[in-house]
Image (cartoon, rainbow, N blue to C red):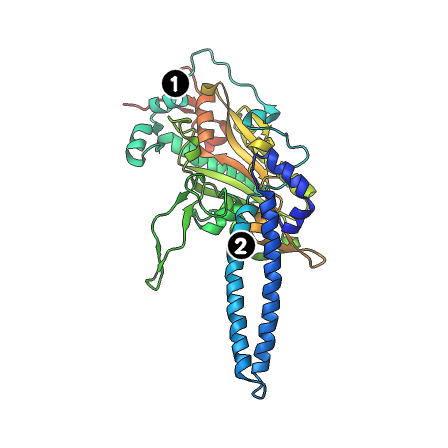
Amino acid sequence: MLDINYLRENLKKLKTAAKNKKIVIDWDQLLKLDDQRRKLIQEMDNLRNQRNENANLLKDPKKRTSALIKEGRALKDKLASLESKYNLLLAQFEEIMVKVPIIPSADTPIGKDENDNVEIFKWGKPPKFDFKPKTYIELAENLDLLDLERGAKVSGYRGYYVKNEAVILQMGLMMFALNKLIAKGFTPIIPPTIVKEFVLFGSGYFNGKTYNPETDEIYKLANADKLSDGSIQKENKFLIGTAEPSLLAYYADEILEEKQLPIKFAGFSQCYRSEIGSYGKDTKGIYRVHEFMKVEQVCLTKADIAESDKIHLEMIEISKELHQDLKLPYRILQICTGDMSAGKYKMFDIEAWIPSKNGYGETGSASNFLDWQSRRLNVRYKDSKKNKNFVHMINNTAIPSPRFLISILENYQNKDGSIAVPEVLRPYLNNQDKIGPKEK
């Protein structure tokens, strides 16, 4: 959440940001609740001071009277009543406050939806085939690389099996991305994929303050934990949709030293997404699935927009390198306000060419949140003047398994139905340069 004092000082700009991001906020109610909240805080502070004075007097046997004891009880009861009232008020205040967006960068395009995103870069030319190209589904079924039918039988809708050389291709992609990021100073991490509620709220993966199964594309675990002493813990747990939340929460409620920044993480994880908002889209194949593998880039920087902007662009350059190393035609879109979530300051999507779509498909997303996430997760650092500041948080996809696999299968297909192996991935397949039909 943003700081309420910052909100009051920048109310006009924040109203514009909310309008451009299509976020409806009752600003009058928010400010009214804040006024009431501040008033209650003052009343509670005054009561606590009176209660402390009363307690000090009661310590003196000469001043300890029944009237003073009665007064102490009355102060305690009144404070408890105010605290209860304050907690209800605070819940109402925070329910609105969590929806307040960050003001996007000055160069973010103003637009209503994905149709208003702006292409800012393009690399490579889509292949021209001298034969009728097959879809990745046809290629994968012919070469026994995917089994969608049995995947659906075992896992349900959007379930799939990856088989044979496609397994090595997929794992090779993950290692290829990790090795590149390690060489560029990123710390490799395999984070937990089961996380507590604060992790997803803190990183902005809930639309509100708590999990809403109608809107949040997150899987919630149904069973409770059994602790080492045999007791049952009913704390809400969830499956992550990307390594980003786990990595961002690594330093939750901690204070770093400025010299530690920037911190760069390369997270490899299995990812889980309910895709409830994508009903009816890409219903066949592995373009849109409930689980997949991904390598994610996450950086924590000083509270300096110039620095976090610079690192944001450096992370995008890594994504560009990965696509170019694989010789996959791609483009970069700058995302407009209407296609950005509340916490994003600036956002780009990377898309690779997919012949069967006769267009590009998203293979990554890069976002700078400034301190919007770190305020929720309470990740700060101490600067040279001993001031405590919230870090800036940036994330960017390195490689997600399904989309890259799709693009490789289709762009590298041959007339005989075989698949050429991208040169940089051949070492992972014992230098095999082609995937052909299996011998029967």
Verify CB contact (< 8 Å) between mark 2 and mark 1: no
Query: Where residue 95 sits in the image (x, y, percent)?
Result: 52, 48
Q: Which of the 4 quarters of the picture holds residue 380?
A: bottom right
Above or below, 352 against 177 in this view is: above
Quarter of the figure with the C terminus: top left
Residue pointed to by mark 2: 89
Between circles 2 and 1, the one closer to the viewer is 2
Query: Where residue 127 sits in the image (x, y, percent)?
Result: 51, 17
Q: Which amino acid does label 2 sit on?
A: Leu
Which one is earlier in the sequence, the residue at label 2 or at label 1?
2
Q: Find the distance from the CA under tag 2 to the CA under tag 1.
A: 65 Å
**Residue closer to the observer: 173 or 58:** 58
Farthest bottom residue in view? 62
Measuring 59% from the left and 81% from the top, which residue is drawn there? 57
Residue pointed to by mark 1: 417
Whether residue 16 is visible to the viewer of this picture, yes or no, is: yes
Measuring 44% from the left and 49% from the top, which residue is drawn there? 192
Numbered mark located on residue 254 in the image: none
Query: Where residue 165 sits in the image (x, y, percent)?
Result: 38, 30
Q: Which of the 4 quarters of the picture holds residue 226?
A: bottom left
Farthest front residue in view? 67
**Residue closer to the observer: 18 or 46:** 46
Query: Where residue 86 sits in the image (x, y, percent)?
Result: 54, 58
**Residue closer to the observer: 70 or 407:** 70
Q: Which of the 4 quarters of the picture holds residue 339?
A: top right
Q: Is residue 386 found left or right of 193 in the rendered image?
A: right
